[in-house]
Image (cartoon, rainbow, N blue to C red):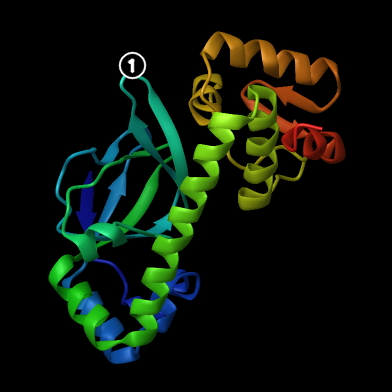
Amino acid sequence: MSQNVVSKCEQCIVRKFGALKSLSKKELLSVSDCKTNQFIAKGEYLFKEGTHLNGVFCIKSGICKLTKLSSNGKNQIVKFIKKGDLLGQRSLISDETVNLSAIAIEEMEVCFVPRAEILDIFKSNPDFSAEIINDICYDLKMANDSMVNMAQKPVRSRFSKALLDLKEEFGVDENGFLQITLSREEFANIVGTATESMIRMISDFSKKELIATEGKKIKVVNDFKLEQLAEDL
């Protein structure tokens, strides 16, 4: 993990995507003066479950996965974090250790802002604090929805929904493949199944022309049928 001085926050396009858009120029300058820039290699941890965060990460480029270690020793992928997202907001408010790990799935550039600086702005800027609270509430809703899906829907429905969600969130490349490339094990960790079962399901979906594959890349071919499967119809 390397660090260097970066451009001022008010010049950064990333701030237009998330809660940072609520900051005044003075607040952005204050953040710029105390932040550090970090480059995270693919496979490297931003932080591990159980550690105490002393600040907030702003994602300038790249993608990481948030994972939860289950009682059987397997990692469940809870969420993906991408450009424009903030990471560590809950710890900012609660001052608790993090209950998830963040791992880069491609090279990332992030800015790290100390907790004290962000907390001062959180207390003085109601628009910024509202954005942060809304983000936390949305994450809680998504976690609840995911828990219900895991408990009530079959694996094929969970996989179908995951494919559609990834397409909506990250888009596709010029050839129609998902912009985000995940391993079979990572897909298994999203839907909560064994890697071997995931490999067989991807093969089955491909044979049924619901998706197309090229190495690790996946293309959604039949959105309508996947939507039906996602609803377990």
Q: Where residue 107 appears, x then y in whole percent?
A: 40, 42
Q: Where residue 178 appears, x then y in whole percent?
A: 67, 39
Occupied quadrant, residue 24: bottom left
Q: Which amino acid type is marked by label 1?
A: Asn
Left or right of residue 50: residue 170? right
Question: Badge 1 is on which residue?
Answer: 72
Which residue is at 46% across, 70% downward?
18
* Image quadrant where one finds the C terminus: top right
Which residue is at 23% across, 38% downward?
48
Reply above or below: 4 against 46.
below
Kindly state the secondary structure of the residue where label 1 is placed: loop
88 and 144: which is toward the camera: 144
Q: Where residue 173 appears, x then y in whole percent?
A: 70, 44
Occupied quadrant, residue 89: bottom left
> Is there any visible trace of residue 100 in the rendered image?
yes
* Image quadrant where one finds the N terminus: top left
Left or right of residue 77: residue 182? right
Which residue is at 30% across, 82% downward?
28
Occupied quadrant, residue 129: bottom left
> Is there any visible trace of residue 36 in the rendered image?
no
Left or right of residue 230: residue 187? left
Q: Where residue 3 appears, x then y in whole percent?
A: 21, 54
Reply above or below: 43 against 37.
above
Q: Number of marks in the image?
A: 1
